[in-house]
Image (cartoon, coloured by chain):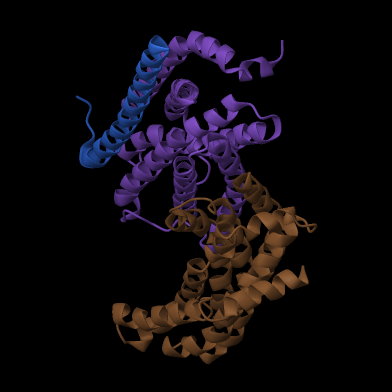
Chain colours: A purple, B brown, C blue
Amino acid sequence: MSIWEYANPVKFMRASGAILPWAVAGAVACTLGGVAWGFLTPDDYRQGATVKIVFLHVPAAMMAINIWVMMLAASLIWLIRRHHVSALAARAAAPIGAVMTLIALATGAIWGQPMWGTWWEWDPRLTSFLILFLFYAGYIALWSAIEDPDSAADLTGVLCLVGSVFALLSRYAVLFWNQGLHQGASLSVAPGERMSAVYRYPLYLSMLGFLLLFLALLLIRTRTEIRRRRLAALIARETRP
Amino acid sequence: MLPLLRRDLTLATRAGGGFGLAVAFFLILCALVPFGVGPDSAALRPIAPGILWLGALLACLLSLDRIFALDHEDGSLDLLATAPIPLEGVVAVKALAHWLTTGLPLVAAAPLFGLLLQLPAAATPWLLASLVIGTPALSMLGAFGAAITVGLRRGGLLLSLLVLPLYVPTLIFGTEAIRRGLEGGSPATPLLFLGGISAAVVALVPFAAAAALRVNLR
Amino acid sequence: MIELGKYAGTVLAAYGISAVLLVGLVWHSVAANARARRDLERQEGDG
């Protein structure tokens, strides 16, 4: 029994149906718990109450990047091994990634208003996320523009491949273009730069929550795609003379 | 491959081929900017390199859908796909033809339009260098976008949504080279990056574009 | 009620926008899934 067994849509539907309730329960518990815990943390001595935004901003930003990586992996699996579930999972993940990017951008802008004195700063990380959002938008638009599902999966897969290279390239180009005022990594392992435990644990919990939330939504949306595909196949079979 | 290049150049330059439209668009864009920004040369000078690069980029974008669309409509693309030359070569030749008929005229026109935008004379060599190095990447990435959207009826707007994010690194390094050249810094680093991007794009993107074409011709 | 001080508007706006976006995404996912399931069941029932 290998992992590729789950590339069979019927097996996937059965397995995902069994996992889904747990994923939903975990996502609700960890996301609400982590964010609520984050909301109740004491004020930071420099940032005041705005430190509470971190518990939304950082997990959303982390997921925005990780979802793109997951889409890249799923696209590669589709292009190499032609498993339909993989292509549909990549399609299902894209809107979730776009919303995560949007949350990261919106919370970043709202946080930047009192901290940097401006809603939008062409800071390298904000700029990179804006570019990432454009890549998500193009990817989603391409999926919905092509009627034949296999062609759509192939073309979006190739776009995801090329887009990944250019998203990474843009990241470094933007860094070269503007050094920026973003703070360093939030979870840096270097001593002294580390966040205090008061903030770190709620952040871990809410990151876990966002991860589970993505998993639950991904399963739901992939199941939707599989059902839609099956419906289209049934209708095609019926209308055939 | 040479006959293909000659054919594409002939098709593009003869009447109705759209040759020169991109340059005309570039001119209009450069003429419109002062109306939007104001005639003050102190305001125009710092933004001139960026406007010239953006103008060249948008003018290039406008002519992208022609790379494969016409050949797809009359079926010659199917013939090219079954021809003894690899499809990757076809893509590269078509991108080269696009660059020769669109990119090169834009490069030649840019210093002239720079005068309209009060671009300092000292920046002209850097403008030319960055455009010459950067525009091949624009044509090749555009050919990739055109290959993806070739079968679609309303591909034009989608094409710009797909291609413009891919242009970001080229645009950044291109304008950065001019800016550094003007400020007396070292424009070698951005120019090298620009050259690296162009070389990698010209070498690798034909494979992605040919793969997309094969899907669309299936 | 927790004291947010002068940044109350900022913090609440960030939480509010995130909540709206997430709820919208979840609602869209669940609604689309329910619709797909219903359509599929109807189709399979017919055939």
Image: B21 above or below A216: below
Residue B56 place in picture, x, y as percent: 51, 74
Residue B192 place in picture, x, y as percent: 69, 69
User: Quadrant of residue A68 in the image?
Assistant: top right
As rendered, which of B33 and A170 lies closer to the eye? B33
**Residue B193 showing in the rendered view:** no
In the picture, measured across the screen, residue C17 lies left or right of residue B157, that is: left
For image coordinates 43% across by 41% down, the residue present is A101
In the picture, measured across the screen, residue A7 lies left or right of residue C32, that is: right
User: Quadrant of residue A210 in the image?
Assistant: top left
User: Quadrant of residue B98 in the image?
Assistant: bottom right
Residue A44 place in picture, x, y as percent: 36, 37
Image: B25 above or below A82: below
Image: A93 above or below B84: above
**Residue reaching furthest to the front:** A241
As rendered, which of A169 and B154 lies closer to the eye? B154
Image: B112 above or below B77: below
**Residue B210 showing in the rendered view:** yes
For image coordinates 29% across by 49% down, the residue present is A114
